Image: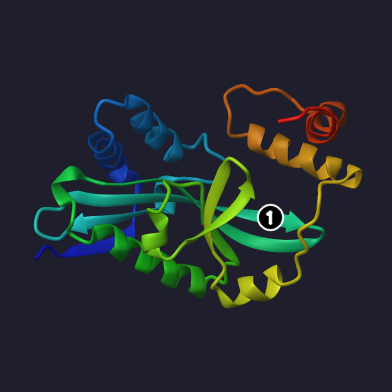
Amino acid sequence: MKQFEIRRATEQDRPAIIDTIRAVFQGEEEFAKMADFFTSPFHANARPETAWIAVDILNGRIAAVEMTASMTWMYEGIPLKALVLLLTGTHPDYKGCNAMPLIHKKIDEWLLENEYDIAFVDGVPWYYRRLGYQPLELLPDQTVYDRFSLPKGKKNLEKLVIRPFEEKDLPLVVELLAHKAKDMLYSFTYDEKWARMFALDYLRNVVI
């Protein structure tokens, strides 16, 4: 049975992380490029040290990796300390060796120690359920997997109220889109006029 060291990655691990993701998604170089971006200074929150890796104790190879980034959500004045899971994978040579569950066990411990409210991922259907994440339906065609089981998170999330989008929410949408645009090489700048068109006028007048 293989043994792994579960730890945060370092700058020195960056080439091996990219190679691991390249091996996971064979023939799809875009994922290696994503791994490069998520471990570069150009991403707003992610760095090599925000990634978690399982290292084979016997030979020092990276068996699995989970890239993450910390964020702060605000919902009507309520701050939520959030961790987003970005890109993950287990090297084909280590499939079935239990490396990824070990990584997530370590992440869970770290989340509790650092009082995070929520961890979430827009991930592969059913995969993250095996790691303790539950599906949260946000839109008809989108499923986000999350876990609210953190004590502080449960307390804060109980204050939230789910309601239809309203005119007063437009400034928040513009702010969120502007924040997201910081991670992009190029993007369209949404002002309140454009946000209103898509979020209110379009949904009200177009039958889907």
Q: Residue at x 86, y 30 (%)?
A: 201
For disc 1, the marked residue is 73
Q: Residue furthest front?
A: 207
In depth, the one of 42 and 106 nearer the eye is 106
Residue 204 image offset from top left, x and y in percent:
84, 34
In which quadrant of the rendered image does the N terminus lie?
bottom left
Mark 1 burial class by Cα count in 10 Å: few <14, some 14-19, many 20+: some
Residue 24 image offset from top left, x and y in percent:
26, 39
Q: Is residue 153 left or right of residue 89?
A: right
Residue 66 image offset from top left, x and y in percent:
37, 51
In depth, the one of 11 and 64 nearer the eye is 64
Up the image or down, 47 lies above or below 149; here it is: above
Q: Residue at x 77, y 41 (%)?
A: 173
Q: Is residue 39 left or right of residue 188?
A: left
Task: Examine the image and state in which quarter residue 40 appears.
Answer: top left
State the SS at label 1. strand
Q: Is residue 66 left or right of residue 19?
A: right
Q: Residue at x 18, y 56 (%)?
A: 96
In depth, the one of 82 and 49 nearer the eye is 82
Which amino acid lies under the numbered mark 1 shown in the image of this protein?
Trp
